[in-house]
Amino acid sequence: MIARTSTPPRERVPATAVALLAGTLALAAADQTIVGAVAPDLKTDLDVGNTQIGLLVTAAYLLAAIGTIPFGILADRSHRVRLLAICALEWSASITLAGFADGYGTLLVAQLALGAGVGAAAPLVASLAGDIFPPTVRGRALGFILAGEFAGAASGLLIAGEIAAFAPWRFSFWALAVAGPVLAVALLSRLREPARGSQVATSTSDSGTPAGGVPPSRAEHGLAAAIRAAGIRPRERLVLHEDPTGKPLSWAIRYVLAVPTNVVIIVTSALCYFYVAGVQTFAIVYLRGRFDTSQEVATALLVVIGIGVIAGILATGHLSDRLIARGHLAARIGVGAVCFVAAIAAFAPGFLVGSLALALPLMFLGAAGLGGLNPPLDAARLDVVHFRLWGRAESVRAMCQNLIRAGAPLIFGWLSVLLAAPGETHDSAQGGGAVGLGRAFLVLLGLFVVAAAVLAAARRGYLRDVATAAESERAVGSRPPRDTGAA
């Protein structure tokens, strides 16, 4: 533990910006959950099994991985709010097409189009959040924003699932398509494009001129200053001495992958999202088969579990900020490791017990662990990269994350068949394959053991990478920054 930082008390988080960025991630997440919510009906109507359902979700993730790279470049150079509004319209057009699908092929094409647009959300939201929220409250702000993402996923499952209970599955897609134009208008009318670097975490230069050419903020006396006071040195080979805005993509990819903490966050968050993607795709099928429930009850149970995710998100974002203020400078990485351990401890018995009354609270706690690791890790990745690389750094992370989790629905579906009980069928709309799915969920929890160990070993390296980013902002601050984005 190191001396407390001088984090200012009662620093407020801009509510409108939080609501709009949270709403953006919520809509993207909701649109991606529809297939999972209506999976039982798709299996019956289109005569497909778990593997084909998994492929629909995998296709969207693959295109999201590809799309995130060009949007990462645009996030560092263009008007981010306007781009988000355009993407919201594209998401709605994609799921509208899905509702008109006359066969599996058309539905697959619609999922590909959805994924291509959803790839924009991560880099654009990350870049905007970094410039809107100071580091002293960034964990808390990202907690609220990510709560919106998971609330969107839960809402998408609830809305689409409940509609599918009394109407054809097509209406589930059409109902959620309405939200895109509403969000686009709200973004353009209520969210102002922030100046780049307006929340840099560095201190002023010796002459008193703010680093990066931006006004000094209270954030200048927080994490970066405490790390310097502790004598933690930057990685000299990674300190930037010129504005990286115009650097080619190949250089940016090499640079962000040379930052050790970035690699750690990419790997661990990808393992988390891999698992979430698989469970999210087959949760309704599992709950219906494992506990012999109806579509409506299974959807309601999944929403309860989703509330656990949101509870974890809201708790750890604020917790990591407070721990840093008390001198635990690597708290963001440490909290992430603890959350992985908590998820293992709760999910393992939750998938083993046969009683819903016992399984539900355990699943709730496991979901809280998974949700809780995201705000501190998302804040940490902004801490360790120069602000003019935020968009491209996030696009690299999101690309790797989406490529890894793209295979999750397919792997979960295949593994559920491999681990199925003798004579178990996987084609039933009433939850076929539930035993195999439960075993697959248990086996793949082993990924969290790896993630927790990697994070636990990365705390000291994280502090050096924060020091490196701060030193880069100081060095580049003596040169006129370039900004091609419209403010």
Image (cartoon, grey):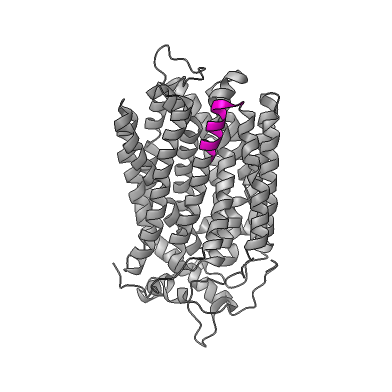
Looking at the image, the residue that sits furthest to the top is 423
Span highlighted in magenta in the image = 156-168
Q: Nearer the viewer, residue 351 or 169?
A: 169
Q: Quadrant of residue 143?
A: bottom left
Give the residue at x 67% y 53%: 184
Q: Is residue 42 above or below residue 191?
A: above
Looking at the image, the residue that sits furthest to the front is 166
Tell me the quarter of the image containing the N terminus. bottom left
Q: Which of 405 and 185 is in front in this view?
A: 185
Q: Could you tell me if residue 487 is visible in this image?
A: yes
Q: Left or right: where does residue 34 sit relative to residue 174?
A: left
Give the residue at x 54% y 84%: 209
Q: Is residue 7 above or below residue 67?
A: below
- Residue 43 is one of the magenta-drawn residues: no
Tell me the quarter of the image containing the C terminus. bottom right
Give the residue at x 52% y 71%: 200
Looking at the image, the residue that sits furthest to the bottom is 207
Q: Is the magenta stretch mostly helix, strand or loop?
A: helix
Residue 458's x, y, as percent? 38, 56
Residue 381's x, y, as percent? 49, 58
Q: Left or right: where does residue 56 sit relative to residue 412?
A: right
Q: In which quarter of the image is residue 441?
A: top left
Residue 229's x, y, as percent? 37, 76
Residue 159's x, y, as percent? 54, 37
Give the residue at x 44% y 34%: 300
Q: Which of 241 and 194 is in front in this view?
A: 194
